Amino acid sequence: MRHTDKKTRLRISILIFSTALSLTLALIIYLLIPEPRLQLIRLTQSYALTAVFFLYLTLLATPLIQALPTLPFAGNYIHARRSLGLSACYFALLHGILAFFGQLGGFEGIFFLSARYLLALSLSTVALFFLLLMSATSYDRAIQKIGYTHWKRLHRIVYFAALLILLHALMLGSHFQHLRSEER
């Protein structure tokens, strides 16, 4: 088997796993939680946390390999970064769609949001746009077309997107809000 085939199979396996995970999470939540509104909330939260987990795995790859060069499967981990990033984007998109159209009620719901919520929504929209842009250019053909230097520069936006996601979570995440209210 050629080296490229192994990389491709690894990446495809991660994407298949992510799709299966999203369906499994939905099934578990729908089976365990009887109330539809609470199902939507829990599924939205689960997809958000899963997106952050995949993003964390993506961002952690290079520092972890540099700190631990003898880490088993280090090469596979580095090759898996693109698929991990695509998975982060996939779950972020699922989270965004469910939160915006399900919980918020679509564009009509925007008019009822406070300035703080609008800011958090704006931050997450920009972050999702960057994740989608990076996902659209995460393929070998895109790298060849725009050139590796430009591609690498574009994909460094992930750090800014991660910061926006963190701010979004701190502003809206119900678990974080409870922590802040306990500090008062």
Image: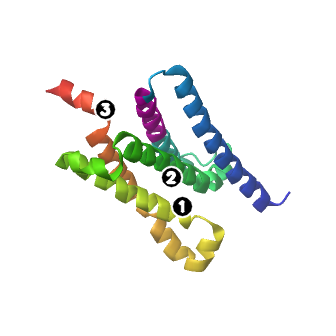
Amino acid type at circle 1 is: Ser
Say whether residue 8 is visible: yes
Q: Which residue is mark 2?
A: 89
Disc 1 marks which residue? Answer: 135
**What crowding class fits label 1: few (fewer than 14 Cα within 10 Å), some (14-19), or many (20 or more)?**
some
Q: Which residue position holds label 3?
A: 174
Which structural element holds mark 3? helix
Q: Looking at this view, is 113 or 107 the one in front?
A: 107
Cα distance between the residues tagged 3 and 2: 22 Å
Magenta stretch, residue numbers? 37-49
Q: Amino acid at mark 2?
A: Cys
How far apart are labels 3 and 1 at the CA level? 28 Å
Which residue occupies 62% across, 66% down? 139
Q: Which mark is residue 63?
A: none
- Where disc 1 sits, the SS reads helix
Dividing the picture into quarters, in which one does residue 171 lie? top left
Q: Amino acid at mark 3?
A: Ser
Residue toward you, 67 or 161: 161
Callout 1–callout 2 Cβ contact below 8 Å: yes
Residue 64 location, x and y as percent? Answer: 53, 47
Whether the residues at callouts 3 and 1 have beta carbons within 8 Å, the answer is no
- Asked if the magenta segment contains residue 170, the reply would be no
Give x and y (percent) for residue 154: 46, 69
Q: Secondary structure at mark 2?
A: helix
Q: Position of residue 146 (x, y in %)?
A: 55, 78
Can residue 66 be seen in the rendering of this structure? no
Picture coordinates of residue 102, whole percent (x, y): 41, 41
